[in-house]
Image (tube, helix red, strand yellow):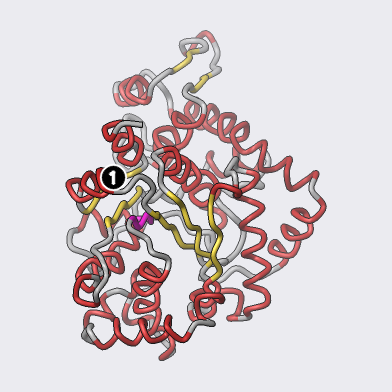
Amino acid sequence: MDIETRMELILREPTEEVITVEELRQLLETESHPVAYDGFEPSGLAHIPFGVLRAIKLRDIIEAGCRFKLLLADWHAMINNKMGGDLQKIRRVGEYFIEVWKASGIDVTKVEIVWANDLASDPDYWRLVIQVARNSTLKRILRCLPIMGRREGEMQEAAQIIYPAMQVADIFKLEAKICQLGLDQRRANILARELGPKLGYWKPVAVHHHMLMGLSGPITPAGLEDENEELDVEISSKMSKSKPETSIFVHDDLDTIRSKLMSAYCPPKQTAGNPVLEYCKYVIFRMSKILDVDRPARYGGPIQYTSYKELERDYMEGRLHPLDLKNAVAEALYKILEPIREHFQKDPRARELYEFVKSQEITR
């Protein structure tokens, strides 16, 4: 596969930012199969950003010839008080995550699944964590706390201050040349880029994907946490599984999906900051390529969209009503999620893990 095709795959939406495109090109010119990684805290039921959007980007990067490592960040989840900080529970949620990946079409034989617990058993890992911390200021580490989904004032336990140094160390212990994570993780990746050469490592390329918005729409934070307001709003507005009424989970049935979408923020003729249109752009047109809108003849009759641009144009010009859009998106998402639901219905082990995770209290 030529370099341009590989670049196109990695840069394809939902990729939103690459630091830097030039360095990515140089990497692909010098390495046929560079290691890319993404990391996840096992922390509850899978929603669409995890179960579908991340899988879309992972497949792009694998197709581009990268070796992909999926980090199940169990120690990180413990530090972040997920599942009450209980490592045994966190482990079971991680096993559930693996079943979600299988159900979403990821060939787990083509990725390497790594548990943070295994990294933590190596003394050299902790040596590197300390090196990262020694070469960072306390202020800089505190500024990285948004990678945990927390602001500086929310930090209650001293253990949480270790988290950013661990995430930077993960990158180099995994030998990752590409960090493929959400935009909310950019501060840790930028710190890794700054410290890598200083610590005798490389400068990893950061590939940040778009953060799918919660159904309640844009949220303007009380104070800026990032370099610009637009980026901070995107991070603050991301779909959170701790707010189930504004999230669509991979297990939701059609009635549940439709009910949630009926309550979603979706102003007529407004395309910016519209979560329902985001599902179309980043999920439906990547997975299904089309969106069928079934509406009565008096409202224009059925119509099929084959590109997001067509859909966006009609919605902006008022030719497509929010209610018709919501109904169409509900049907499309239900079909996209069908293989995942079926896997958890038919596979006894997957079902057992799902029932366990469902029974647990989900915390931020």
Is 329 in front, or is 290?
290
Task: Locate residue 278: give its quadrant.
Answer: top left
Whether 94 is drawn above or below 271: the answer is: below
Residue 180, magenta (yes or no): yes
In this figure, which residue is indicated by the disc labeled 1?
Answer: 28
Whether 130 is drawn above or below 183: the answer is: below
**For numbered disc 1, what is the local secondary structure?**
helix
Is 299 in front, or is 233?
233
In this rendering, position of residue 193 left or right of residue 275: left
Looking at the rendering, the stretch of residues picked out in magenta corresponds to: 178-182
Whether 174 is drawn above or below 51: the answer is: below
Residue 130, given in percent of the width and then of the height, sits at: 34, 87
In this rendering, position of residue 235 left or right of residue 226: right
Residue at point 53%, 47% (across, down): 48
Residue 260, given in percent of the width and then of the height, sits at: 56, 44
Which image quarter is the N terminus in?
A: top left
Residue at point 37%, 26% (across, down): 308
Whether 329 is drawn above or below 153: the answer is: above
Residue 41, given in percent of the width and then of the height, sits at: 51, 67
Is 231 in front, or is 183?
183
Residue 114, magenta (yes or no): no
In this rendering, position of residue 324 left or right of residue 313: right
Residue at point 34%, 63% (across, down): 185
Q: Tell me the amino acid under the disc marked 1.
A: Leu
Is 316 in front, or is 11?
11
Residue at point 48%, 49% (across, down): 49
